[in-house]
Amino acid sequence: MTEAHLTVRDLTMAYGDRIIQRDLNFTVNRGDIFIIMGGSGCGKSTLLRHLIGLLPPARGHIYYGDVDFWAAPPAQRQAILSRIGVLYQSGALWSSMTLAENVSLPLEEYTRLPETEIRALASFKLSLVGLRGFEDFYPFEISGGMQKRAGLARAIALDPEILFFDEPSAGLDPISAKRLDDLIVELRDSLGATVVIVTHELPSILAIGTNSVFLDAETRTMIAQGPPRELLHHPNPKAREFLTRGGTLHE
Ligand SMILES: Nc1ncnc2c1ncn2[C@@H]1O[C@H](COP(=O)(O)OP(=O)(O)OP(=O)(O)O)[C@@H](O)[C@H]1O
């Protein structure tokens, strides 16, 4: 049974008078690993900011379930946001805090759990991303891949229903990137979460994406949507070329 988790209807996004994308329409179903893709500057990160409540639409709607996010009262919006986890490109860890302290932050801010329980939960979340035993390390003491995973531990601290990633494998070697992909799938399954990823990484897109939307910078709208592997044969040559690196990559 598919159930819509996030629905974008007639969305137009703009900075001031400058329209970035218009007439976006797509649905992210529960359990999807949904990819937002397209060339540089087409508006992928901008779309992510709209989805996670940082930028209001110039026009159109974003529904969580059947709640129109931007039309909802602040308390309802806050409730939706509390069920969202975000992993930014940089991992965005606080450098002056240990990994356990970083993961504890959202728990301290949004729960009333006692300190010992928070500490235990932080260790548990770190173990889920393969960082058991690294609680007292500082971000600068671990590799880029481990920093990403620590950022992921923090993003899942509050057991989100939906997880957003902005270029998760940027700056990672192919093996660390593959490990992160595997972890994303594993966490989707164990948390029963929905995942939305902005990425350029073709191997990731084709390996883990269950559905996708392709944004075009030139026409400033979406020109394809569907499971990434199906877009390899899409009639629109731009989407097809993006996914096949201009025709050099084959299934
Ligand atoms: N805060 C802002 N104010 C004005 N314009 C912006 C702002 N942020 C982004 N833009 C512009 O909006 C367009 C889309 O940017 P965005 O970062 O969303 O694209 P992107 O697809 O994520 O790009 P990339 O793949 O290069 O990261 C770009 O032309 C960018 O210059």
Image: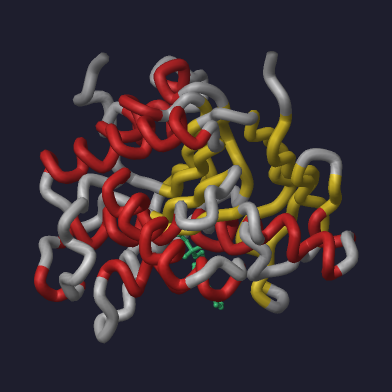
Front-most of residues 144 and 107? 107
Q: How many marks?
A: 0
Front-most of residues 229 and 160? 160
Q: Quadrant of the C terminus?
A: top left
x and y, in percent, of residue 8 in the image: 73, 44
Horizontal placement of 44 versus 9: left or right? left
Q: How has the structure been colored for display? A: secondary structure
- Residue 2, located in which quarter of the rendered image? top right
Horizontal placement of 198 versus 174: left or right? right
- Residue 25, located in which quarter of the rendered image? top right
x and y, in percent, of residue 165 in the image: 43, 52
x and y, in percent, of residue 129 in the image: 28, 46
Give the residue displayed 26% in from the left and 42% down from the top.
180
Horizontal placement of 152 versus 81: left or right? left
* Up/down of 115 relative to 146, above or below: below
Q: Quadrant of the N terminus?
A: top right
- Residue 175, located in which quarter of the rendered image? top left
In this view, which residue lies farthest toward the bottom?
Answer: 96
Give the residue displayed 47% in from the left and 38% down from the top.
35
x and y, in percent, of residue 159 in the image: 53, 48
Give the residue displayed 83% in from the left and 60% down from the top.
76
* Up/down of 132 relative to 105, above or below: above
Give the residue displayed 56% in from the left and 31% down from the top.
224
Front-most of residues 115 and 6? 115
